[in-house]
Image (tube, rainbow, N blue to C red):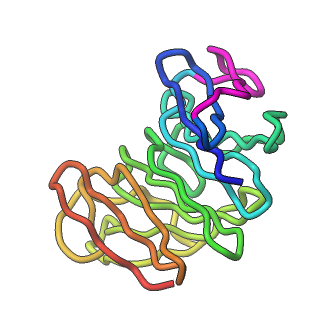
Amino acid sequence: DGNVVVADSGNARVVVFTPEGVEFLSFGAYGTGNGQFRSPERVAVDNDGNILVSDYMNNRVVVFSSGGDYLFAFGSQGTGNGKFSGPLGIRTTTDGSIYVADSGNARVQKFTSAGNFIGWLGADETGNAGWHGVGTSNAGVKDTGACRFRTPTDLAVDGEDCLYVLDGEVSAIQKFGP
């Protein structure tokens, strides 16, 4: 529909604008409850029009309908599967999968459209870099090189579902196939 969705961190809300730049929807408030944020940083819109928001200080992703109604949230503070330390970039794929840049844990996590953990990308504590599945529960290790991150901050997904990861600490972008 051409609308522009913006995370307004300073006001702990999300604002939706028409293609003409007119604000027509705003939702969220400061807090830790359902539909609240402590620091909404990035947004993504899935194939159904749902709005996904990375809430950096609450260490979670919050999902809303296109009309701004709270649907669910996933994640919490930590290093295990599905836990975050400062989630930033967020993107969805054509099959509904959700990628989240877990900046403090030096990894990118992948979830189903319902917020269930699938796996993570980065270097593990043994130095193995790449995709790690459900059986691995440690955080990523800050490193540089292929499939390694210092602080992943932003993500993009192209039309072929290739993932692009910006490592803000070293100003590098890596591309991963679908």
81 sits to left or right of 73? left
- Total labels: the figure holds 0
Q: Residue at x 63, y 29 (%)?
A: 22
Q: Quadrant of residue 31?
A: top right
159 sits to left or right of 95? left
Residue 68: x %, y % from top left? 79, 34
104 sits to left or right of 14? left
Q: Residue at x 82, y 37 (%)?
A: 67
The answer to which of 30 and 94 lies nearer the viewer is 94
Q: Residue at x 73, y 41 (%)?
A: 73
Image: 130 above or below 105: below
Q: Residue at x 47, y 48 (%)?
A: 79
144 sits to left or right of 43? left
Magenta includes 32?
yes
Residue 168: x %, y % from top left? 24, 50
Residue 72: x %, y % from top left? 79, 42
Residue 13: x %, y % from top left? 61, 23
Q: Quadrant of residue 129?
A: bottom left
Q: Quadrant of residue 29?
A: top right
Image: 135 above or below 16: below
The answer to which of 28 and 75 lies nearer the viewer is 28
Image: 57 above or below 54: above
The answer to which of 45 and 109 lies nearer the viewer is 45
Magenta includes 9?
no
- What range is drawn magenta here? 21-37
Q: Quadrant of the N terminus?
A: bottom right
